[in-house]
Image (cartoon, rainbow, N blue to C red):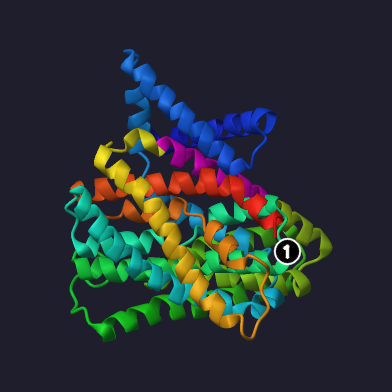
Amino acid sequence: MSIINTIAILISLAAIFSYLNHKYLKIPTTIGLLAIALIMSLGIVLLGKMGLPIEDQAIALLKGIDFNETLMQGMLSALLFAGALHVHLEELIKQRWIVAILASVGVMTSTFLVGFASYYIFGWLGLDIPFIYCLLFGSLISPTDPIAVLGILKTVGAPKSLETKIAGESLFNDGVAVVVFLVLLGIAGVGGHGDHEEINAASIAALFAQEAVGGAIFGFVIGYIAYRMLSSIDNYQVEILITLGLVFGGHALASALHLSGPIAIVIAGLLIGNSGRKFAMSDKTREHLDNFWELIDEILNAVLFVLIGLEVLVLTFDTTAVIAGLIMIPVVLAIRFFSVGVPVSIMKVRQTFTPKIIRILTWGGLRGGISIALVLTLPAGEYREALLMVTYVIVVFSILVQGMTIGKLVKSR
């Protein structure tokens, strides 16, 4: 099937599901789309059991879509930029220490704790998965997904300081997690930058600095160039085109230079969303830019969550892996509670936090498409199939259950 037809089918499904959710379910869009897509997937499976060929056609469509490539090299940069545009830099600077610690130390702590826990749990269940793959699982399941988190935050009505903490962490920690994942992939000898190099502490530190710090510097540079271009003209069509070039061209160039594209785009988005909006745009341009990126955000979000829901059709179902996923749900939440609770408790000595902040950050740490995209980069085989099933179970629970209830938790402060 051609790429045009594939896009046409996905956008059509997203439109129909969005209508059904808005008309009947009336729940947050991302959650509603995932729920409807899951129901549709199960319906397709049942029709397939009844002899209708629709299941084979749906599976052929999904197998023709590289989920990892579609999200990590396509959608992610636009979604991160759209999210960063509306994060207030002054508020983020006030929360810089907690955001930085959660997005770095928190992710790495969670990676190793989940890795150790999953190694023993998988072994106990009879899943023979090597320790390095368990660490890879820890790195891909630890970051909170900015796409899922920002989508839910829009409907929660959280205080600005709390929203900044959650959004700031989610925007940055996926970039850190991707770097950690690449390092571990290299150690495993199945990809990443470490394939042909000796892996040691120095090379790991160098890779981390190159990807994360280099990505941040690169993001500032391309963001500043775009800012200067925006400030020199007053034509909203051209200015929107400049931001599109910044997002997609900037991400592609960062990847080519082995820098973190997600971190670069977040930094560029923060620069354009704050200094750019204040000093480089007219009111007319600002309004059009906001409307444009809000629309892009909604469309890509809709397509992504439909894709996540349909992905169940191509999973290799294994009862043991499903049980492992169900067991790992409370384990991952407990480790999230620990990795968030320790730094917040230490910082409470000098800083005032929102009531129930640890519980809100724990329960609001949704997992989403990034986790699925990363697990799909693992080489094909039994390890990937088992870890994909475990990851999918956790992601679906996170979006449907945590996403549906985080609003009540925030309002009950």
Residue at (46% x, 40% y) in the render: 307
* Residue sitting at the far top: 51
Instruction: Please state which amino acid type lies under the numbered disc 1.
Output: Pro
Indicate yes or no whether the magenta region holds residue 304: yes
Magenta stretch bounds: 294-310
Residue at (57% x, 73% y) in the render: 267
Q: In this view, does 312 lie to the left or right of 96?
A: left
Residue 114, percent from left and from top: 34, 63
Mark 1 nearby-residue class (10 Å; few <14, some 14–19, many ≥20): few
Main secondary structure found in the magenta portion: helix
Front-lying residue, 177 or 326: 326
Circle 1: element type: loop
Residue 391, percent from left and from top: 36, 50
Q: Is residue 362 left or right of residue 22?
A: left
Residue 394, percent from left and from top: 41, 49
Res 403 seen here:
yes
Which residue position is annotated with label 1?
Answer: 159
Indicate yes or no whether the magenta region holds residue 280: no
Front-lying residue, 145 or 98: 98
Q: In which quarter of the image is the N terminus?
A: top left
Q: Quadrant of the C terminus?
A: bottom right
Res 78 seen here:
no
Front-lying residue, 152 or 291: 152
Residue 50, percent from left and from top: 34, 13
Q: In this view, does 143 lie to the left or right of 180?
A: right
